Image (cartoon, rainbow, N blue to C red):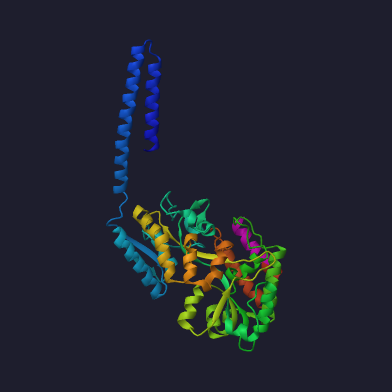
Amino acid sequence: MNRSHRVSVVVVAALVVTAAACGSDDDATDTAADTAADTAADTAADTAADTAADTAADTAAAPTEGAELRAWGWASSETEDAALTGLLGEYATQSGTAVTFEPQPEYDTALQAALSAGDPPDFFYVDSFKLPDLAAAGALAPVPSGAITDPDDIYPSLQAAFTYDGTWYCPPKDFSTLGLVYDADALAEAGIEPPTTMDELAAAAAALTTDTRTGLVFGPELARAGVFMLANGGYITNDDVTEMTLDTEGNRAALQYLADMFAAGNAAKPSDIEAGWAGEALGKGSAAMVIEGNWIVGFLADNFPDRNWGVVELPEGSAGRGTFAFTVCYGVGTENESDAAWAAVDYLTGPEGAQKWTAAFNVMPARESLADAWLADKPELEPFLNGADYAQPWQFTPGFGDVVTEFNTQFEQLIAGDITVDDLVVSVTEAGESVLG
């Protein structure tokens, strides 16, 4: 029974009882009481019928059987695209809803064009970094109440990654974190255990650096350097991304630590050692340790199957460990929002779909209830999953992308020895304040 029907019953009954109370004799009172009972019963019956009719109408208005949907994502490996297509095929068999996955080579450009034209796909990939801009533009429909199965099962940090201005917009399909991935043979030959603290990391990087190999390699960007600030209790902004917080002792110490390691030649960016990214550097043997996410596992298996690697959580700083949660959700556009689209998203991100999806790849399930089964099948990846407990969502606020770009530019100059930590802090803080106000 909906709220308006409940209110109608209460109001009608109250009016009749009031009329009965005005009677002057027992017969009148009995008659009024009978009338009240009959009226309430009739009203309740009518309400029940109305509710059943409403439910039937709602069901008819929420088509899944026979619906045809389009889903967009960025072009990935053929294996991954085929796996998603297969999962959507299973959903079609169960639900009667046909969903066609259409990977886009130039995803951001294609999605923006589709949104601008008012004809986006029914649901589509949304990176947590892009969510604020899309939400602020009104391009995403919020998650309807009850549309997603057991949302409390989703890691809080991942649900937060797709929440903007207090509104939850989409459930994550999976996630990745960063860990310290290392060449197990190189560490064994040097008699070095995987480092667990920043001091141990610096010492290991120095000991593992040779004429043909660099101790530590990672991309020169906030998405890597930021973990050192997090481990020192700082970050570029406050938690709600309303204030720049780069200018702190902990952040400065983390940045200087990295500048010193690069200056000593014990750390390098991939391009310095003729590698396209850190995973390639590790695979080729030109890096002993890299800071990368669990996506590196499939890459090494496919391209460097003989590389004996291991992974540990990123080393502790003065305030503990730091990592980022990189995650993508299935967003439903406001233009083509439908119950059928939300039902498909719920299947893909729900317990059944998420289990099947993450079993096929090295991405991690966004649902805590699936963690144990996933680990039982991939125990060597536990350090990545452990990061979910303290990961910083990779998300900012609309317009902040330019500030991240400024940090990346300044950081490259810092590790090249062209500027100081002070220079970086001043430049990036000014850029951030121009966006945040």
Q: Is residue 139 left or right of residue 100?
A: right
> Magenta includes 274?
no
Depth check: 289 or 395 in front? 289
Q: Which residue is at a point 65% across and 81% down the rendered structure image?
A: 192
Tell me the residue at 71%/68% (across/down).
Answer: 253
| Res 417 visible | no
- Visible residue check, residue 255: yes
Left-right relation of 180 to 1: right
- The region drawn magenta spans 425-437
Q: On the rendered image, what quadrant is the N terminus found in?
A: top left
Residue 243 image offset from top left, x and y in percent: 63, 56
Q: Residue at the bottom extreme?
A: 211
Q: Residue at x 37, y 30 (%)?
A: 8
Rendered-image quadrant of the C terminus = bottom right
State whether residue 50 is above or below residue 306.
Answer: above
Q: Quadrant of residue 317?
A: bottom right
Residue 189 point in image, percent of width and height: 62, 86
Residue 426 belongs to the span the image colors magenta: yes
Quadrant of res 2 = top left
Residue 334: x percent and y percent? 40, 54
Residue ID at (50%, 68%): 375
